[in-house]
Amino acid sequence: MKPSTPVQVPHRVKVLVTGILLLMAAFGGLTSVLPSYLIQPVVSMALALANLVALALLFLRSRDPGPERLGWRLMALSILGGIAANTVLLFTPSPLVRVSLTEVLFFGLQVVIALVQAWALLSWPFQRTPYRSSRIRDVLGGLIFAGSLFLLLWTTNLWQEWDHGRWPVFVRIMGLSIRVAIIGGVAAYFLAGDPRRVRGPLGWIFTAAVITVAAVLLLRSYLYDANAVLQPSWIFGLLLVIPLTYAAAAWLEIPVEVPEDLPELPYNIVEVMLYLPFAAVGGTLILTALLHHSHLLHQLIGFVLVSTLLLFRQFLLLREVRLAKFRLEERVLTRTRNLEDLQGIMLRTERMNAVGAMGAGLAHDLNNTLAGIRVQAELARTHVEEGKSPTVSDLDRILVAADQSTALTGRLMAFARQEEEAFSPLDLAAETSKLEKILRMLLTRQTSLSLDLGSGPAFIHGSRNHIEQVLVNLIGNARDAMPQGGTITLRIRVEAEADPPVVRLEVGDTGSGMAPEVLAHLFQPFFTTKAPGKGTGLGLASVKHLVEDVNGSIQVHSVPDQGTLFTLRFPLLP
């Protein structure tokens, strides 16, 4: 089964809900006009067909690879258990005065179905909240919902069967009550953690539990007491909806976990749904007190009022917590964007600092080329004064020197204005070779640069912009560490036998080195040992960020008065 696109899902949901409601209405209308002797076989056949449809769709969904597979397989297994339970109920004779083996089997199947579906929900890859207090709140929400469902069924059905000693019917209803309480409680636990999950498969399973409760309340005499004569009723349409909700959960192919960018539900709809069973229990208790135990009426009314106030307070608290969470997430997102903007400014600032440092080297090279242009121009002028025409070679030398000046300034301007580039495979050795002229612009006359680029290509994943900024920062720092001059060595080696294979880039100098207390803070932003106005303290911090951006690592070894060696390792591309 191929996943549907996000645009198609809302349309499919509308079509599916409309189809289920129309089918329920049509089937309810049919059973309301059927003769009494046809109701049981028609209902049984329709229910079996709906279960088979759900089983087929769940089985197809369980074939998709991924972490959801086990959950869908367990859901399919639970539908098989439901078919077995309905078969047991269909061929069970009228309930006897005492509990028979068939009632015990039906009860056991309901408990097994509940445990299997709970296992399915727990196996799905729902993201658990990292906060202990939030997990406790979600567990309590699930327990309150499960307990309220069971208490609602007890006060409406179970206590009457218990009071009158109708044990076979009591066992049947008890089995279904335990089933919906367990499934509803586990579903409510995950919905309390993130109410947006109601839009996915969890919402359909939660709906199935609620509809099952409605079926127990409205169809008790039809479903669980075979002595009762089945009368035509539109309510039988509810029975088809239960397996069809499981079919819908599988057919829509929506992931069980909601995406991070899915908006919150309006008006905390799920929280209200989780409290409805408790409110229904309160209303049922008042009605029971009026009909059977009137002397408890005042106490029950007081209990319900206090409980309502407590629930309202909890509802307001949850709304405030969710609002605070939303505001906090917005602030964190804004702060993250600001930090990303500052990081971009930091990298651009370091680039412009490097451009400034290159100015001295550029001026020296430009002076050399301009001197060459002047010499050739003076020679051509001498030839003219002597009555000779300038030779083509004289003019060519002037043009070559001018082109060299243009290339130098163009390269520097390109380095200054480069923007972020997409990562792609590139040869670190070849890129470093192209940067040699730029790197030499950084150096003083007393500083020499030795390049050892290895004997072959060294492919890594990165961008030219990143490599340029890393090398310019490291070479510039090495130059500053040698105010009296010295040698900078840049070496590239491919370590194909390493685990994992890497490309090693070393930048070493023969400068003053660093003490251990300096090394401990070397990569911290704004940390610098240079005089005020000589450095921003962002160079090595930006280098570390750029290297880690491509899953690389950086290490430094330094001894005072003996020099410093930076070792960078990048994953080697095959």
Image: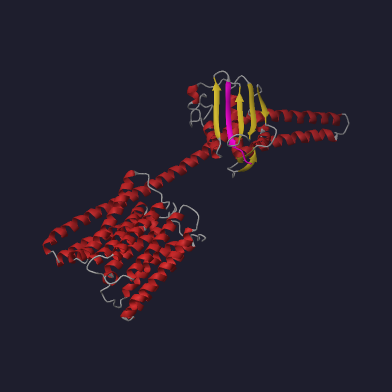
Colouring style: secondary structure
Q: Residue furthest front?
A: 101
Q: In the image, 186: left or right of 571? A: left
Q: Is residue 17 visible?
A: no
Name the residue nearer the viewer: 293 or 163.
163
Residue 303 vertical placement versus 337 (above, below): below
Q: In the image, 429: left or right of 529? A: right
The quarter of the picture where residue 244 lies is bottom left
Residue 197 vertical placement versus 27 (above, below): above
Name the residue nearer the viewer: 248 or 531.
248
**Rendered location of residue 251, percent (x, y):** 46, 63
The secondary structure making up most of the magenta span is strand
Exactly how many numbered labels are in the figure?
Answer: 0
Name the residue nearer the viewer: 346 or 148.
148
| Quarter placement of the C terminus | top right
**Rendered location of residue 365, percent (x, y):** 69, 29
**Rendered location of residue 518, percent (x, y):** 49, 24
Instruction: Assess whether residue 282 is covered by the magenta stretch.
Output: no
Residue 299 vertical placement versus 390 (above, below): below
Q: Residue furthest left?
A: 295
Q: Which residues are magenta?
A: 563-574
Instruction: Assess whether residue 569 is covered by the magenta stretch.
Output: yes
**Rendered location of residue 406, percent (x, y):** 71, 37
What residue is rendered at 50% in x and 59% in y? 3
What residue is rendered at 16% in x and 59% in y? 300
Q: In the image, 416: left or right of 213? A: right
Q: Residue furthest top?
A: 561
The quarter of the picture where residue 107 lies is bottom left
Q: Is residue 518 visible?
A: yes
Name the residue nearer the viewer: 377 or 282.
282
